[in-house]
Image (cartoon, rainbow, N blue to C red):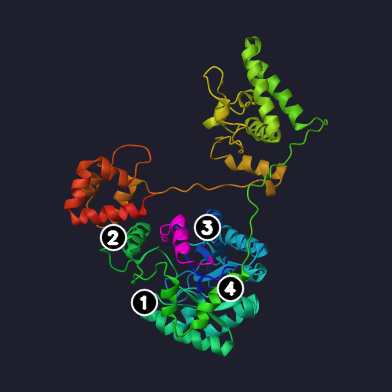
Amino acid sequence: MHQQSDYVPLHLHTEYSLLDGAIRINELIKKASLYKMPAISITDHGNLFGVIEFYKAALDAEIQPIIGCEVYVAPSSRFEKKQIQGTDEGTYHLILLAKDNKGYKNLVNLVTRAYTEGFYYKPRIDRDLLIKYNEGLICLTSCLKGEIPFFLQRGMIEKARSSADFYRELFGFENFYLEVQDNGLPEQAEVNKKLVDLSKELNVGLVATNDCHYLMREDARAHDILLCIQTNKTVADKDRMCFNSDEFYFKSPEEMKEAFKELPEAIINTRKIAEKCNVRFEMNLNLLPVYEISDGRTPDEFLEKLAMDGLYRRLGDKVNRVYKDRLIRELNVIKEMGYSSYFLIVWDFISFAKRNNIPVGPGRGSAAGSLVSYCLGITDIDPVKYNLLFERFLNPERVSMPDIDVDFCKVRRAEVINYVAEKYGKEHVAQIITFGTMAARAAIRDVGRALGFSYGEVDKIAKLIPNAHNITIEDSLNLEPRLMDIYKTSPRIKELIDIARRLEG
């Protein structure tokens, strides 16, 4: 690790802490590079959605990525749906950082179980899961909503001590740290004093973090609006969720050293923890299974037989040289690129669906340009008839996996997924997520609502955004003079648009 900053951020929420974190990963990495940080962590609330994007961006900038998560811990069993006694809180917070690939796998197991077994308002784990999946993990005690800070804030010293003993024994002395924070909140100052005392008493290390939720101090207002959007409140609502400070931003090493000048070891320990962490991913591996044919034929041979049979089944005596040449050309490309098994697997699960009367869509996207797909019954669109290009779907000059979009009846879609997992192995099957982001008009409407604008007023502003694909608010200001005019003349509307610009996308 290069001799750079002594401070490493170990508690940080990106935009993947949905409607709570407001830090875009690309902007974060640029800032970390500016601050000459040797490493940086991601610890989103209850999920690992942003890990791969973060990992790639950090490595590209020659910064060490530290993979973590701020998990939610149930006060008793994850199966019990109840809140912490005497509060409206349902969980404690806890920071877990992966030291190595074993730790990362355990983190994945914990987060998965939190959703599938412990979900109650939030995805929750419990101590039983931590006992099972703690290897390769470093544990930090998190913010004021962490278990130990929670007890200390309420004067429950013995409970705090007992919890600290549990985590120290579970993770080991060298992998457990008491987390001190200073976001300008008086409660933190009081809890920090007690954490220092507990650290001395139990001989447990301290670590300084800043619980970053937005990039710059001036983003605090936009972040506050984001919380309003999440909770469906307006800024005027009393007793709404808010942070009561503008210091949850990505602070510089100098700012953190100044904040913890009385506890220099808490800064030094951030670097020590970073030096313990080394998760490495093997990217772009081909994990496709080989399609097994019982009579000994290869996937290439079987695909060619199915495709030729399918061509005559589809067209009968209308088969001509144009179709045959096109089919042979496509088959040669598929074979050369090693994707015969992929086509056979897709053909197989679509055939399963049709045999079991599960409705299947006719095909969409670039796969509709493949005659092989049409002959196999994967799609129902004749690409020759409609002059569709195979090269848009699969091109030897652009080496990338083919992507066949298939639509199944949503009621019975799970049957198809289960069939594929059982036949080809769960290790070869995964579901992926798609995130919706706030487009320009939606950002204007959501921010306007949170700021207390009337529906009519915000609707007029939103309708000034030109109706163009992927247009931004910045583009709209340049293209629409009426929008620029109200932006320049109305301070209220200027604030709305400035915040929406920060949150869109």
Q: Quadrant of residue 289?
A: top right
First-in-chain label (2 vs 4): 2
Is 134 a magenta residue?
no
First-in-chain label (1 vs 2): 1
Q: Is residue 126 above or below residue 385?
A: below
Q: Name the side, left or right, on which 481 lies relative to 180.
A: left
Q: Are marks 1 and 4 in contact (CB under 8 Å)?
A: no
Q: Are marks 1 and 2 in contact (CB under 8 Å)?
A: no
Mark 3 vs mark 2, foreground winner is 3
- Amino acid on which disc 3 is placed: Ala
Q: Is residue 294 above or below residue 183?
A: above
Reading the image, the residue beneath label 1 is 184
Labelled disc at residue 273: 4
Could you tell me how far apart the alpha carbons at marks 1 and 2 are, in whole angstroms? Answer: 24 Å
Q: Is residue 140 above or below residue 454?
A: below
Reading the image, the residue beneath label 2 is 234
- For the record, the magenta segment spans 18-39
The one nearer the camera, 276 or 233, is: 276
- Amino acid on which disc 4 is placed: Ile
Could you tell me how far apart the alpha carbons at marks 1 and 4 are, in whole angstroms? Answer: 25 Å
Residue 463 at x, y = what percent? 26, 41
Q: Name the side, left or right, on which 488 lies relative to 284.
A: left
Reading the image, the residue beneath label 3 is 61
Residue 295 at x, y = what percent? 83, 30
Residue 120 at x, y = what percent? 50, 62
